[in-house]
């Protein structure tokens, strides 16, 4: 069916070309049959076998369909433009009614066997599929324009991801002919990008071409090939808004954990939530990148730095909480630690510590450790150690036992008579007092111990709070450094 169909197609084509002149059709048919009469499409069209054919190739990039970073595969759609001279397809214009050019189906004539060397498509071998027409001029100049989609391998360097540039090569060459037989040349110094359809993920920075001659060990002849380098720059906005910005925000709220009071019990929860969120983000990023270890993407480094910082924050928090909640009866703060934290660091970070105030208070009222009655037999009858007066001593000012009678005179009433045996009472009260003293001393000792415990606790708490400040300072410095680094690299 194909040859018949093609014949009709050519016929119709020629018909429209030569509508004006009726004899034109005959001329074209005659020219065509004359040209193809002895034509062999499998033979290189040179009259002298030793002559070479120069083939010019140019590519017009239409679209980048996909760049698969994970599988390192680039899919493009291109228009290929191939030009060469066919010595058997030239004619004398005056002999054929001034026809200067005609079309041939590319299947009918010789076409160079140009292949995409770095093709990775399973369905195609990377060759140019004949199918479209070629245009031939009376000088035998053939131009063949053919659309083609390519699936090529592309080594992807994800180092600066998502601020990366990629250079994907389309590598063309003749598969079987040496450079002597088919000399492949670039038709221009860069690919034609005038019809390029913009890509949402990439900016196309250019597509220069480089011609190389390669020598293989088999043969002395050179094998020329053309390398079209598609230079792409990623549009980073998507990644900035979806990955960098959330991570940056998590990073920035991380130092605030030190502002949470340790008593709230929320500190570790806060740390762990941020850490988990980041791990999820990292998972998302790593899914879209090739599983290679030769280069860690920038965003991965940023995430790793952030996770490291969050981990350190969590660790510092655990230590701070441990110090903050010292059990009563734990060891006192080591003098060296006290010196470093409560004196130097406290001064540097402007922390006033509560245990020091406590110390001052304590130094102010220097009370003896136990109460003692220095000479119990001397003054006991006169004064009690706790103030007030002995029950048998007269106390003129303190109480007035007098009452007013009806006549308006004050009648002196007898003070209540307390009668007791002084001797017995003295010994008795001495025994009681001793009991009381013993009890009081026990209580005082307990209170003192409790106070000492509290003091130790307070001191540890101060150490914890100063550590808190120190950690806050370093985390803020690290956070600022990390965010500045990523923002500078983002070029924002
Ligand atoms: C083309 O043909 C005409 C007439 O046959 C002849 O005069 C002319 O020299 C030819 N031209 C060439 C370039 O051969
Ligand atoms: C082929 O490419 C080179 C650069 O690689 C350039 O200098 C040269 O002009 C190009 N050839 C043509 C015909 O444009």
Image: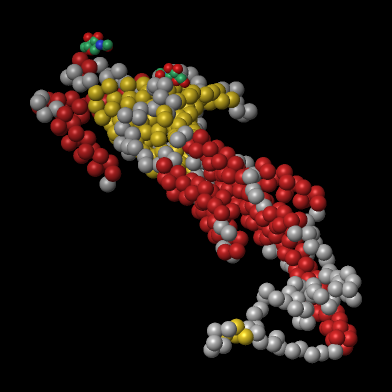
Residue at image location 56% in from the left, 50% down from the top: 255
Measured as percent of width and height from the top left, residue 103 is found at 26, 30
Measured as percent of width and height from the top left, residue 110 is found at 38, 30
Horizontally, residue 331 falls left or right of residue 309, namely right
Q: Would you identify the image quadrant in which residue 476 lies?
A: top right
Q: Which of the pair 68/412 is nearer the observer?
A: 412
Q: Which of the pair 193/318 is nearer the observer?
A: 318
Measured as percent of width and height from the top left, residue 164 is found at 50, 37
Residue at image location 37% in from the left, 42% down from the top: 200
Query: Ligand 1 is found in which quarter of the picture?
Result: top left
Q: Which of the pair 110/228 is nearer the observer?
A: 228
Asked whether residue 471 appears in the rendered view, the answer is no
Q: Quadrant of the C terminus?
A: top left
Residue at image location 76% in from the left, 82% down from the top: 391
Residue at image location 67% in from the left, 75% down from the top: 398
Q: Which of the pair 81/279 is nearer the observer?
A: 279
Question: In this rendering, is residue 145 above or below 240?
Answer: above
Horizontally, residue 185 falls left or right of residue 462, namely left
Question: In this rendering, is residue 276 above or below 199?
Answer: below
């Amino acid at each position: 069916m194909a040859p018949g169909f093609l014949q009709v197609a050519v016929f119709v084509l020629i018909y429209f070309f030569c509508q004006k002149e009726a004899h034109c059709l005959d001329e074209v048919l005659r020219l065509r049959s004359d040209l193809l009469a002895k034509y062999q499409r499998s033979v290189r069209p040179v009259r002298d076998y030793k002559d070479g054919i120069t083939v010019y190739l140019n590519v017009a990039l239409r679209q980048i369909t996909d760049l698969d970073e994970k599988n390192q595969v680039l899919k493009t759609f291109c228009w290929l433009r191939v030009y060469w001279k066919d010595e058997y397809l030239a004619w004398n214009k005056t002999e054929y009614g001034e026809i200067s050019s005609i079309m041939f189906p590319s299947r009918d004539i010789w076409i160079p066997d140009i292949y995409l060397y770095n093709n990775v498509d399973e369905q195609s071998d990377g060759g140019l599929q004949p199918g479209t027409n070629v245009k031939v001029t009376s000088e035998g100049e053939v131009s063949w324009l053919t659309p083609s989609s390519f699936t090529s391998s592309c080594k992807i360097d994800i180092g600066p991801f998502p601020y990366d540039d990629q250079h994907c090569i389309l590598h063309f060459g003749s598969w079987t002919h040496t450079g002597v037989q088919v000399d492949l040349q670039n038709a221009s110094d860069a690919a034609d990008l005038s019809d390029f359809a913009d890509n949402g993920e990439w900016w196309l920075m250019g597509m220069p071409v480089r011609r190389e001659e390669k020598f293989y060990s088999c043969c002395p002849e050179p094998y020329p090939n053309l390398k079209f380098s598609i230079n792409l720059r990623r549009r980073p906005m998507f990644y900035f808004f979806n990955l960098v910005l959330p991570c940056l925000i998590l990073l920035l709220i991380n130092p605030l954990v030190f502002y949470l009071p340790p008593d709230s019990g929320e500190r570790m929860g806060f740390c762990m939530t941020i850490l988990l969120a980041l791990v999820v983000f990292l998972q998302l990023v790593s899914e879209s990148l090739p599983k290679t270890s030769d280069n860690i993407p920038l965003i991965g480094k940023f995430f790793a730095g952030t996770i490291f910082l969050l981990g350190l924050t969590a660790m510092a928090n655990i230590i701070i909480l441990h110090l903050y909640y010292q059990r009563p009866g734990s060891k006192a703060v080591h003098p060296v630690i006290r010196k470093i934290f409560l004196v130097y660091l406290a001064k540097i970070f402007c922390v006033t510590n509560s245990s020091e105030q406590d110390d001052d208070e304590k130094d102010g009222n220097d009370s003896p450790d136990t109460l003692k009655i220095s000479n119990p037999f001397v003054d006991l009858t006169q004064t009690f150690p706790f103030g007030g007066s002995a029950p048998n001593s007269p106390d003129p000012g303190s109480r007035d036992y007098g009452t007013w009678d009806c006549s308006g005179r004050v009648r002196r009433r007898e003070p209540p008579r307390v009668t007791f045996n002084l001797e017995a009472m003295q010994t008795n009260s001495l025994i009681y007092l001793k009991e009381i003293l013993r009890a009081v001393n026990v209580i005082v000792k307990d209170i003192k111990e409790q106070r000492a415990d509290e003091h130790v606790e307070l001191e540890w708490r101060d150490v914890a709070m100063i550590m808190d400040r120190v950690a806050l300072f370093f985390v803020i410095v690290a956070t600022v450094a990390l965010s500045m680094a990523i923002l500078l690299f983002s070029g924002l």
